[in-house]
Amino acid sequence: MISTIFTPSILKKVLLMTVLLCSVIVHGCVDNTDSADSINGADSIDSIDSADSTSDAEIPEKLTVLHAGSLTVPFAKLEEVFEAKHPDIDVQCEAAGSAKTIKKVTELNKEADVVASADYSLIPSMMYPEYANWYTQFAKNQIVIAYTGNSKYADEINASNWHKILKRDDVKFGFSNPNDDPCGYRSQMVIQLAEAHYSDDMAYEDLIEANSDMSMTYDDANSTYVLHLPESESINPSTKLMIRSMEMELIAGLDAQEIDYYFIYRSVAKQHNQLFVELPQAIDLSSVSYTDTYKTVQVVQANGNVVTGKPVVYGITVPKNAPSPNMGLEFVKLVISPEGQQIFTDLGQPPITPATGSGEVPEELELELTEQ
């Protein structure tokens, strides 16, 4: 057996070397760990911040535009133009009947930056004072009767006999829900106005009352015809009459030959290359010259809202609770600008030039209106 003898001198050297070695090992471990944490941690945080920053930069700000169905085509074009001018903005347009559109804000608490209605008067009557306090009138329109070459009696129908054609047993027609959409209650106004214009005292009774639970009374005191609308689920249209929430939804029915004719705005018929009967101004709700005639008809919607006949004029506003009111106002400016007005003209809808404002119109928009 071999034994090793450690002298005090040797032991001292061994002990010193051991201490130094442990110190190096410990120091190296601590430094490496700290260094790794420092590098990896900093890089990790920086990369997360960078990713978040990049992600935020790549996600454009959303601009929500709620609008009447009849504005679908021009607003799609306005969306393209606006996004080209503001690459950081994602315009999201959503179409519905104008009354239904406004109810999304006032009843369903949906946030919107812009609201555009096919009937400007719905903005003050349904949104004032809580949800809006101004609007701009920016476009006009008129009611026509659209059809295709496959519609029954397409070769016969004209501005003089359309009410007789629609009464025929084998003819089906449609219009939008008058509780949801101005085109729907305007269609009924047209039919009622037709009674006096064509000396057909049964036009409304034969076309509407006979095919639904909607009804008409006469107010002797005001010399006004009053059309009464039940709740939407109680309208009960017959197989002769198609009713959809939004006028645009009737296009599919016409294309599928489920209906032969439907009441629609002239601009929509032109945008979809449909044939249409252009009605006399005395009943088509297009002319201020016939304002006194139009107002002889009123519609009482199921919610009690009363709408008086008047020329078709569109309105637009930025709701009080808009998430992006400044950008919403920029969109309105585009709508009423010469560029925006040209878009409407090109798509068959007459713009109001200059656009007019009502209520507490923002000062910068007032300047735009004044300069037109």
Image (cartoon, grey):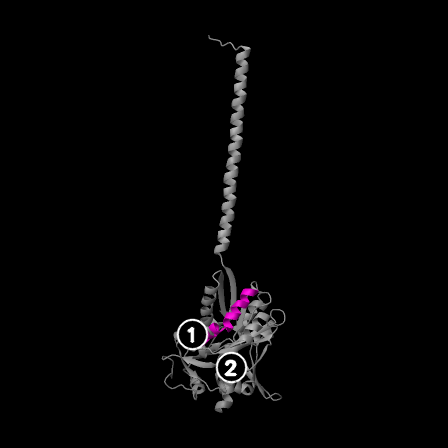
Of 99 and 367, the residue lying toward us: 367
Task: Tell me residue 323's x, y (percent).
Answer: 57, 62
Res 201 visible: no
Could you tell me which residue is drawn at 52 percent across and 37 percent down? Answer: 37
Residues in magenta, as a range: 325-346
- Residue 176: percent from the left, percent from the top? 49, 76
Residues marked 2 and 1 touching at CB (< 8 Å): no
Q: Is residue 74 magenta?
A: no
Image coords of residue 141 (percent x, y)? 48, 79
Find residue 251 and name its label. Answer: 1
Q: Which mark is residue 122?
A: none
Three-letter amino acid code of the residue under disc 1: Ile
Q: Amino acid at mark 2?
A: Gln
Say few, some or many: other residues with alpha carbon within 10 Å of mark 1 (under 14 / 14 to 19 / 20 or more).
many
Residue at x 51% of width, y 50% of height: 52
Q: Which mark is residue 188?
A: 2
